[in-house]
Image (cartoon, rainbow, N blue to C red):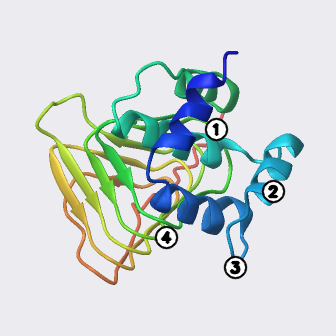
Amino acid sequence: MKYIHIIKFLMTHDLTFLKECWRVEFLKKSKFSWKHLLKKLIEKENTYIAWWRLASEMAKYGNKKQKINKYLIVRYAVEIGLEKTFIDVGFSITHYSSIVFYDNIRAGKNLSIRQNTTIGSKDEGACFILGDNVTIGANVCILGGKIKIGNNVVIGAMSFVNKDIPDNCTVYTQKTNAIIQNS
């Protein structure tokens, strides 16, 4: 009985975008199939994105009953806002751990992120726009007000980004090691 609202949602809404996301990101097949989707969900192998996509679509249509995102936060340590966050088709997470996307994020196609990534701001006016084909390495912080990251951008591991990045760039924060001999 606790899944009845999910079934009702799936039967009464336009699922074109959701099915395309599931096909590309989760099923990795040329055609969408409910049979393949259910089989993979039952196997419980890397199901985060499939469930997040469903929760996001349900929130977009005003369905507040679902508690999917709360479950995902606890299980995967990944917190991605639902109502004001849009991520286009081709979203991938390489390692699930300590990922936080605050609201007001719009990401283009083929966004790839790794563990320990934070994007956002507590500022209500902040808006983050990530273009198509953006790859974000591990331990990256993208913080600030209104930040636009262009298309075809690679952000290296352990980088801090607080300003716009143009198209076709690789960005990383230079780090240096200091070695001090103990006496």
Quadrant placement of the C terminus: top right
Quadrant placement of the N terminus: top right
Question: Depth-wise, is mark 2 or mark 1 nearer the camera?
Answer: 2
Which mark is on residue 110?
4
Which mark is on residue 30?
3
What is the secondary structure assignment of the residue under circle 2? Answer: helix
Distance CA(mark 2)–CA(mark 3) = 14 Å
Residue type at the position of mark 3: Ser
Distance CA(mark 4)–CA(mark 2) = 25 Å
Which mark is on residue 35?
2
Residue type at the position of mark 1: Ser
Question: Where on the picture, by quarter, is residue 83?
Answer: top left
Question: Depth-wise, is mark 4 or mark 2 nearer the camera?
Answer: 2
Q: Earlier in the sequence, mark 4 or mark 2?
A: 2
Distance CA(mark 4)–CA(mark 1) = 20 Å
Work out which residue is located at the far front of the displayed protein and give it: 12
Question: Depth-wise, is mark 4 or mark 1 nearer the camera?
Answer: 4
| Residue 14, above or below 152 | above
Which mark is on residue 120?
none
